[in-house]
Amino acid sequence: WNLYDAGIKIPFIARWPGQIKPGSRTDALISLVDIIPTFIDVAGGDPEPVVAGCGGEPLDGRSFLPVMLGKKTDHHDAVFGVMTYGVITGYPMRAVRTRDYKYIWNIDSHFAYPDYWETNLPATQVEWGVWKSWVRKSGTDPAAAKVVHKNLYRPPDELYDLRKDPHEMNN
């Protein structure tokens, strides 16, 4: 629904007996575009020549096999996120994330962010009731009004120091 870490940070779990050390972890930045080159690498192929099969365009990703095998601790300096919320309404967002910072560009921030509970998507009665209670309270409570406004209107630019603010609460 958005480009905050809670919405885009996905754990990657791999098991490869005799190759990947059991219980090992990494905080290396990888991206979904890295998966195909990595699988090619794991299969013993060379991911570089594959570019000819992609209309002459190079693959965006690169193998993170050395990270999985514990030979490297880093992969990318930055990863990118793209989200266009809503098929009909559309609300394009873009992000770049490094280990320490995240920048989010809300391209159409002058429009209201499509509200999850106002769409035709399935929301539980509890979710619907919670959101509606915030909207009702926003008419008389300035703190609630601030929360509702923050959910509906995103700033054009958001920058988070993930070391000091890992939950991306303070732009």
Image (tube, rainbow, N blue to C red):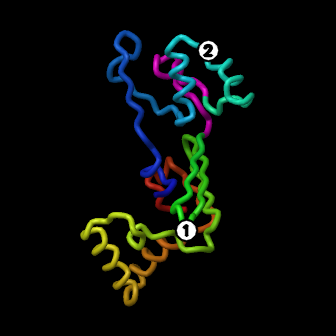
| Residue at the (72%, 31%) spot, across then down | 57
Disc 2 crowd rating (10 Å Cα; few below 14, some 14-19, many 20+) is: few
Front residue of 161/133: it is 133
Residue 65 magenta-highlighted = yes
Give the alpha-carbon distance from disc 1 to disc 2, as whole Å. Answer: 42 Å
Q: In this view, does 49 lie above or below 144?
A: above
| Along the line of sight, the residue nearer the viewer: 87 or 149 | 87
The dominant secondary structure in magenta is loop
**Which stretch appears magenta?**
62-78
Q: Which residue is identified by label 1?
A: 89
Mark 2 secondary-structure assignment: loop
Residue 46: name its quadrant.
top right
| Amino acid marked by disc 1 | Thr
Can you say whether 144 is above or below 68 in the image? below
- At horizontal 40% and vertical 89% (from top left) the residue drawn is 139
Residue at 37% across, 9% down? 18
Q: Nearer the viewer, residue 13 or 157?
A: 13
Counting from the top left corner in percent of width and height, residue 162 is at 51, 49
User: Circle 2 sits on which residue?
Assistant: 46
Is residue 67 magenta-colored?
yes
Residue found at the very far left of the displayed protein: 126
For label 1, the crowd category at 10 Å Cα-Cα, with few meaning under 14, some 14 to 19 and many 20 or more, is few
Q: Which of marks 1 and 2 is in front?
A: 1
Disc 1 to disc 2: CB gap under 8 Å: no
- x, y percentage for residue 66? 53, 18
Q: Is residue 25 left or right of residue 95?
A: left
Percent across and percent down for residue 156 are 63, 66
